[in-house]
């Protein structure tokens, strides 16, 4: 069962604070973007605009893309209240009506985990490549591929099929995210991809891998991962 991103859940997800955003992925992504000289940024799968607003305050010119209108409405409402110059577009991220070679930076944060097939993931990488200028930077944030079927205090992923393994790309399962208040948020219908598949797909698309950052918080194994790649 996939999460239904209706208005009620979109508002709930926007209002809660995930440990992943505050302590794990968030600080790493902010550090990478703060060091980047690129100005034009596209956030693919921007949701309610959490990172868009952070980047806009770093003097980036930000465009946010999402196909979920309920989440975009929250982002647009925030922009109306605090004008940061962010442009939001409702679109499927595999086919965005923006001309090629437009952006310096593209972000995919917790987007790939929602994709049901390797074919779609590869399409997303190709779209990122098209949208980026030469030497543009792609930043991918998400759950570490190794973080499956391991009980831990933070975000983790459990494969639905007990016979499935780490090596089964697009294997379906449930991810559980820890909130800063100690409660948990359950996402059914997420998908697992190996690190090998992700890295090799980026290389085949035309990216050079610049950085892989394995992230943890109060655990002795990686919880999340950030991959940074440059367009050749």
Image (cartoon, helix red, strand yellow):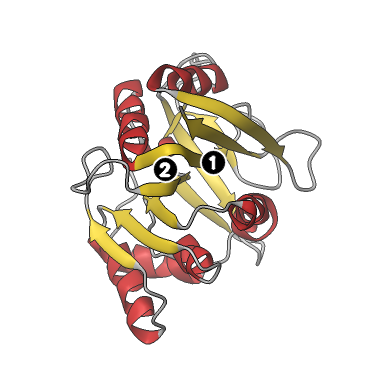
Q: Do the residues labelled 2 and 1 touch (CB within 8 Å)?
A: yes
- Front position in the image: 194 or 1: 194
* Helix, strand or loop at mark 1: strand
Q: Name the residue under label 2.
A: 111
Residue 148 shows up from this direction: no
Quarter holding residue 7: bottom left
- N-terminal label among 2 and 1: 2
Where residue 88 appears, as percent x and y from the top left, is: 29, 64
On residue 104, the disc is none
Q: Kindly identify the residue that appears in the image at 59 percent across and 51 percent down.
A: 36
Q: In this view, does 49 lie above or below 142?
A: below
| Quadrant (top left, top right, bottom left, bottom right) of the N terminus | top left
- Against 112, residue 25 (above or below) is below
Q: Residues within 10 Å of mark 2 (few under 14, many from 20)?
A: some
Residue holding disc 1? 142
Spatial separation of the CA atoms under disc 2 and disc 1: 7 Å
Helix, strand, or loop for circle 2?
Answer: loop
User: 10 Å neighbourhood of mark 1: few (<14), some, or many (≥20)?
Assistant: some
Q: Residue at x 67, y 51 (%)?
A: 24
Task: List x then y, in percent, for residue 111.
Answer: 42, 43
Residue 181, can we see it?
yes
What x and y, as percent, mark residue 106? 43, 46
x 51%, y 68%: residue: 59
Residue pictured at 49% horizontal, 61% vertical: 51
Q: Where is residue 91 in the image (x, y as percent from the top left)?
A: 22, 51
Quadrant location of residue 184?
A: bottom right
Instruction: Name the outermost residue toward the left.
Output: 97
- The image shows residue 176, relative to residue 71, as above or below, that is above
Image position of 46 (left or right of 66): right
For the residue pair 79 and 159, the one nearer the viewer reads as 79
């Amino acid at each position: 069962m996939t999460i239904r991103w209706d208005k009620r859940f979109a508002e709930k997800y926007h209002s809660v604070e995930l440990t992943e955003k505050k302590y794990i992925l968030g600080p790493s992504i902010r550090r990478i973007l703060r060091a980047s000289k690129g100005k034009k940024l596209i956030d693919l799968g921007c949701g309610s605009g959490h990172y868009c607003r952070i980047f806009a305050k770093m003097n980036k010119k930000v465009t946010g893309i999402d196909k979920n209108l309920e989440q975009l409405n929250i982002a647009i409402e925030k922009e109306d209240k605090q004008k940061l110059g962010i442009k939001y577009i409702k679109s499927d991220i595999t086919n965005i009506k923006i001309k090629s070679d437009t952006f310096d930076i593209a972000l995919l944060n917790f987007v790939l985990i929602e994709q049901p097939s390797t074919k779609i993931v590869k399409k997303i990488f190709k779209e990122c490549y098209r949208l980026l200028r030469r030497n543009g930077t792609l930043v991918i944030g998400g759950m570490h591929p190794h973080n499956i079927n391991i009980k831990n205090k933070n975000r983790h992923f459990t494969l639905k099929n007990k016979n499935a393994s780490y090596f089964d790309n697009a294997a379906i399962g449930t991810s559980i995210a820890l909130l800063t208040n100690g409660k948990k948020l359950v996402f059914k219908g997420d998908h697992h991809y190996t690190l090998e598949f992700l890295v090799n797909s980026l290389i085949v698309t035309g990216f050079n891998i610049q950085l892989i950052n394995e992230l943890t918080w109060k655990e002795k194994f990686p919880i999340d991962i950030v991959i940074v790649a440059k367009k050749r």
